[in-house]
Amino acid sequence: MTFAPSSDVTVAVLLPCYNEAATIAGVVRGFREALPSARIVVYDNNSTDGTALQAMLAGAEVLRERRQGKGHVVRRMFADIEADIYVMADGDGTYSPADAEELIRTLLTERADMVVGTRRGVTADAGRQGHAAGNRMFNILYRSIFGTDFTDIFSGYRAFSRRFVKSFPAVSAGFEIETEMSVHASRLKLPVCELELDYGRRPEGSHSKLSTYKDGLRILWMFAMLMKETRPFAFFSMISAVTLSISMAFMTPVLAEYFATGLVSKMPTWVLSMALLMISFLIFTAGLVLDSVARSRNEQLRIHYLNQKQISAKALAETPVPRQNGNDKDVRVA
């Protein structure tokens, strides 16, 4: 069945694209069939292969973001488009438009702010085997730092509430934007769900834009920056512990000599160890202060999130909840 929301509920399908002429028309037609009343918007990010033309011919609204990078596109999409429910997918055809109904159903029934379509069979896609190890490593790292809300932080197939979209700061420039979305949900303790979906193979002529090492380093750097901003006490405590360990390594032989002979023959080493000790204490103190600042920022973000308009109870009651063949998919509620 196709999804037909109440006339008071608006749905927007957002498709960031860069050189996806081989697939974008099929993706647009798929979403038009699955969500006939939705606004389908393709954001072209300086494509050179006719992506914008193919999207327009397929019936999508095409807008442009000239700053290169998926993060810039997502920031522009979230700022420009007004809707009650947002569905974001990639234009490469690896995500099935038919699954959008299930994402929206889960968003509505679970009253969630974000539903992530986790990728089943992601490593079966041609060219993705090289990314599989990094994908697993970053997901494990995410869960160890930010919490266990998500198992696939890099999925590009997601459904959002208006509250999430209009409270999300979106400061990333590239593919690390999905990580930032996940951290935003975790830091504000927003209701989120995961829905396991099939992940398709790229058709011939379509290629991944990810660079294993370049984008991997950018994502790792984003992890560090997000940890500094959201968990400054843990971040600076680790730096403080490393500095303290170096200080003790320099200090120990000097103290051993002093207790044995009553003399300090390596005065420069002693001065360096004491300087590192003081730096360690200063870094630890900075972490304590910044932790209070981070808590205050989280409270402000939470208040801003609560001030956003949500779907009215009347409109929600009038919106039919779609199901696929009467069978629910596995839903993980964080």
Image (cartoon, rainbow, N blue to C red):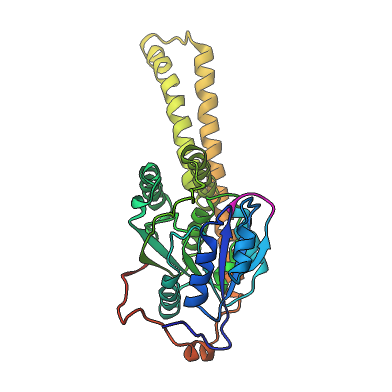
89 or 226, which is in the foreground?
A: 89
Placement of the N terminus among the 4 image quadrants: bottom left
* 144 left or right, relative to 280: left
User: Is residue 102 visible from the viewing direction of this image?
Assistant: yes
As displayed, is residue 240 above or below residue 321?
above
The image quadrant that residue 151 belongs to is bottom left
All told, the count of numbered labels is 0
93 or 161, which is in the foreground?
A: 93
Q: Residue at x 57, y 88 (%)?
A: 7
Helix, strand or loop: magenta stretch:
loop
Placement of the C terminus among the 4 image quadrants: bottom left
As displayed, is residue 105 above or below residue 271?
below
As displayed, is residue 199 above or below residue 28?
above
The image quadrant that residue 271 belongs to is top right
Q: Residue at x 41, y 71 (%)?
A: 99
Q: Residue 211: x and y, percent?
A: 50, 41
Q: Residue at x 54, y 54 (%)?
A: 177
Q: Residue 88: x and y, percent?
A: 52, 65
* 323 drawn magenta: no
As displayed, is residue 216 above or below residue 189?
above
The image quadrant that residue 258 belongs to is top left
Please report the bounds of the magenta region as a residue range: 66-70
* 331 left or right, relative to 26: left
Q: Residue 29: x and y, percent?
A: 52, 71
User: Is residue 300 visible from the viewing direction of this image?
Assistant: no
247 or 52, which is in the foreground?
A: 52
Q: Residue 97: x and y, percent?
A: 45, 69
